[in-house]
Amino acid sequence: MSEDKPHGMPQFGASGRKIVYDENGKPCRTCNTLLDFRSITNNATSKAAAGAAVVTATASVLATNVPSDCPPDVEELGRSTWTLLHSIAATYPEKPTDAQKDNLKTFMKSFSNLYPCFYCADDFREYMNKEKIQVTNRDEFGKWLCNAHNAVNVKIGKPVFDCQLWKERWKDGWKDGRCD
Ligand SMILES: Cc1cc2nc3c(=O)[nH]c(=O)nc-3n(C[C@H](O)[C@H](O)[C@H](O)COP(=O)(O)OP(=O)(O)OC[C@H]3O[C@@H](n4cnc5c(N)ncnc54)[C@H](O)[C@@H]3O)c2cc1C
């Protein structure tokens, strides 16, 4: 995989983000947003050059109207993955055995090598090298994961989540009862 653009291919997508290409010089679907992926594969950048109104209209069409059974973009992949990871935290034992701790460490290490957005995985491995994974119990791992997620949020300009609330979000449901 590469972030370098192949000859003759656009460097930026319709959102203004840099397009990530795979090892065959094709736009990487799981590394780009759907909007950017489609703006390259549908050649919308040339349409966009025709005018701002066309850009806006093209962008909104490209970002929507996707059947639910298509391969994920970087955002859908991310949302689904965070759901899995935080749900693992929510069901991790309060008093794990040594074997359970080892399983979690092994899983997270493998995950950080296999995550399908390669530059996301590179940065996540770097995070794991800096911030040692906490597997002592559910709350420790839940908070470690919440902080890891926040590091990604900061990197891509999303709001930081209050990690005191991770269990309400991912295990018990909000105190106002809307998840009951
Ligand atoms: C390991 C990993 C690395 C990633 N790296 C990148 C990257 O480098 N570049 C990129 O563009 N995208 C990356 N992503 C995807 C990105 O994090 C988002 O998943 C994606 O942008 C969709 O965001 P979203 O707004 O739907 O909410 P998401 O960030 O997917 O979060 C889903 C839900 O989790 C809750 N939440 C938010 N923050 C926290 C937190 N700190 N703790 C607990 N719950 C929380 C919120 O309720 C939110 O709605 C990565 C994903 C993963 C799993």
Image (spheres, grey):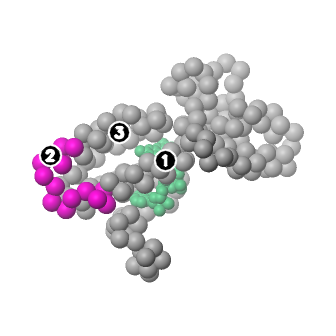
Q: Which residue is mark 3?
A: 111
Q: Which residue is mark 2?
A: 99
Give, as a three-letter code, the residue at label 3: Phe
Q: Name the residue rendered at 68%, 46% in the picture.
A: 66
Question: Does the numbered disc 3 mark a residue whose Cβ is under 8 Å from ligand 1?
Answer: yes
Q: Which residue is mark 1?
A: 78
Q: Nearer the viewer, residue 18 or 168?
A: 168
* SS for dot 1: helix
- Is 18 included in the stretch rendered in magenta? no
* Label 3 to label 1: alpha-carbon separation: 13 Å
Q: Is residue 78 visible?
A: yes
Give the image quarter of residue 109: top left
- Please state if 124 lies on the left or on the right of 158 as rendered: left
Instruction: Return the disc, 1 or 2, that comes first in the chain's sequence.
Output: 1
Q: Which residue range is magenta in the image?
A: 89-103
Instruction: Return the disc, 3 or 1, that comes first in the chain's sequence.
Output: 1
Residue 15 is situated, as x and y percent measured from the top left of the image, at 68, 44
Q: Tell me the quarter of the image containing the C terminus.
A: bottom left
Q: Name the residue rendered at 22%, 43% in the picture.
A: 103
Give, as a three-letter code, the residue at label 2: Ala
Does residue 146 lie above or below 100 as drawn?
A: below
- Please state if 3 lies on the left or on the right of 167 as rendered: right
Give the image quarter of residue 94: bottom left
Instruction: Return the disc, 3 or 2, that comes first in the chain's sequence.
Output: 2
